[in-house]
Amino acid sequence: MLQSLAGSSCVRLVEQHRSAWCFALLVLGYLLYLVFGAVVFSSVELPYEDLLRQELGKLKQRFLEEHACLSEQQLEQFLLRVLEASNYGVSVLSNASGNWNWDFTSSLFFASTVLSTTGYGHTVPLSDGGKAFCIIYSVIGIPFTLLFLTAVVQRIIVYVTRRPVLYFHIRWGFSKQVVAIIHAVVLGFITVSCFFFIPAAIFSVLEDDWNFLESFYFCFISLSTIGLGDYVPGEGYNQKFRELYKIGITCYLLLGLIAMLVVLETFCELHELKKFRKLFYVKKDKEEDQVHIMEHDQLSFSSISDQATSMKEDQKANEPFVTSQSPTSNDSSINN
């Protein structure tokens, strides 16, 4: 008996705080996913980093042995300066791109990466004025970009998602939920094909040192706005039609970002995902809301009635005194 009562009380406790328990599981799952990613990246990339460190150490030692007139301190100062310049997008290699990093097309590409929060990091402002302008430009431009993308996606999704789903539902009598799921899957497949696989194949041809996997990696990192900056197109040696190429990449990033948001919004409108998201949201207690509303209405009504009563009393107090006539006198005047 006691066990059944305890079990029922535990069930009621869980049901009353179901949203909080789901949110706690969500936080725990997210933390475990972070740890899982850290473990995998560390186990995969750490051996390659160790090999690279050993290779660079051997190369440095061999260079110092072949050039005895150069001290290790001088070499490190030179390499430090070269690396600092490389972080700003400037290279001292003879086969590096001879194009400027801040011509109009490159600046347009940089502005698009800033406003879309992709931020490859291959080119950064050099001057203090440029850094200050970048801050102000981003503070205004990023909310402006979010507003622009929201307005565009809101208009596109009506013709791409809602009307097709409603047409198949009304015209053919299919279940709206089933049609929405099939439409979301088809739209996702088309988007992945048009903005990932096909551009990856094009980049693998245009970029000399990129294979298909590296090109697909660039497309995903760019359109997901991660923007690691390890692969940036149009920075190769003697890139043909570089200005036109940069403008094309800017348009691709903008259109791809819009397509990704349309697909994301399409999946978010699925009934099953809406129900799943509600598990982690804070649920409002309707009874408490109604009680607060009723109390507020009662307080408002009582305050209004009190004000009206006081106003009437003030008016009566301010009225002149009038003697009332007796009913008999009134009747006699009427008869006359």
Image (cartoon, helix red, strand yellow):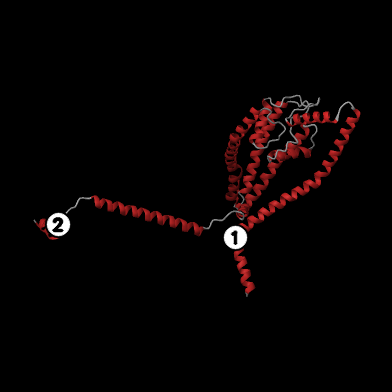
Q: Which of the 4 image quadrants contains residue 126?
A: top right
Q: Considering the image in quadrants, where does the N terminus appear?
A: bottom right
Tell which of 329 and 205 is nearer to you: 329
Residue at the bottom extreme? 1
Tell which of 9 and 97 is nearer to you: 9
Give above or below for 327 relative to 136.
below
Give above or below for 15 relative to 260.
below
- Residue identifier under label 1: 17
Give above or below for 273 relative to 156.
below
Q: Which residue is drawn at 60% across and 32% down?
A: 136
Give above or below for 69 relative to 21.
above
Q: Measured from the top left, where is residue 176 in percent x and y? A: 60, 52
Q: Tell me the tag on residue 203.
A: none
**Label 1 is placed on what type of residue?**
His
For this view, does 318 lie left or right of residue 122? left
Tell which of 106 and 61 is nearer to you: 61
- Residue identifier under label 2: 325
**Label 2 is placed on what type of residue?**
Gln
Q: Measured from the top left, where is residue 295 in percent x and y? A: 44, 57
Local secondary structure at mark 2 = loop
